[in-house]
Image (cartoon, rainbow, N blue to C red):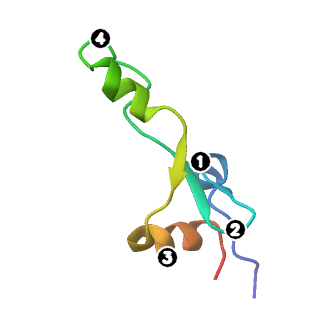
Amino acid sequence: MPKVKTNSGAKKRFSFTGTGKVKRHHAYHSHILTKKTKKQKRNLVGSTIVDQTNMKQVRDLLCLR
C-alpha cells in the first residue's frame, strides 16, 4: 500500500508547539486593511492554537493520527 501524502498547503500553513498543539495564523490580515480598525488589525497579528473542533481535519491534512 502506498504512503499517504501530506497536504502541501497545510504543511505551509500550520506548525507545532512543543507540547504537540497545532499553531495557525489569523486570516483577514493580508489586504483591504483600510476599512479595518487599528484594534482589529492588531488582534489579527501573531498566531493562535487551532480549535479542538477543527483539530481532526488539520491532523488528517498533515497525515497525523
The residue tagged 1 is 13
Q: Are marks 2 and 4 in contact (CB under 8 Å)?
A: no
Q: Amino acid at mark 3?
A: Lys
Q: Amino acid at mark 1?
A: Arg
Q: In the image shown, does 48 or 13 lie closer to the viewer?
A: 48
Quadrant where the N terminus sits is bottom right
Of labels 3 and 2, the one closer to you: 3
Q: Position of residue 65 (x, y in %)?
A: 63, 83
Sequence-wise, which precedes: disc 3 or disc 2?
A: 2
> Residue farthest to the top?
34
Instruction: Tell me the distance, in whole angstroms, between the alpha carbons under discs 3 and 1.
Output: 16 Å
**Which element carries disc 2, helix, strand or loop?**
loop
Sequence-wise, which precedes: disc 4 or disc 1?
A: 1
> Residue farthest to the bottom?
1
The residue tagged 3 is 56
The residue tagged 2 is 5
> Residue farthest to the front?
39
Decide: few, some or many residues near mark 2? Use Cα within 10 Å; few <14, some 14-19, many ≥20: few
Sequence-wise, which precedes: disc 3 or disc 1?
A: 1
The residue tagged 4 is 34
* Residue 15 to residue 56: above or below: above
Q: Are marks 4 and 3 in contact (CB under 8 Å)?
A: no
Determine the image quadrant of residue 34. top left
Residue at coordinates 42% horizontally, 68% vertically from top-left? 54
Instruction: Tell me the distance, in whole angstroms, between the alpha carbons under discs 3 and 2.
Output: 16 Å
Instruction: Tell me the distance, in whole angstroms, between the alpha carbons under discs 1 and 2.
Output: 16 Å
Decide: few, some or many residues near mark 1? Use Cα within 10 Å; few <14, some 14-19, many ≥20: few
Residue at coordinates 33% horizontally, 25% vertically from top-left? 39
Q: Position of residue 15 (x, y in %)?
A: 67, 54
**Which element carries disc 1, helix, strand or loop?**
helix
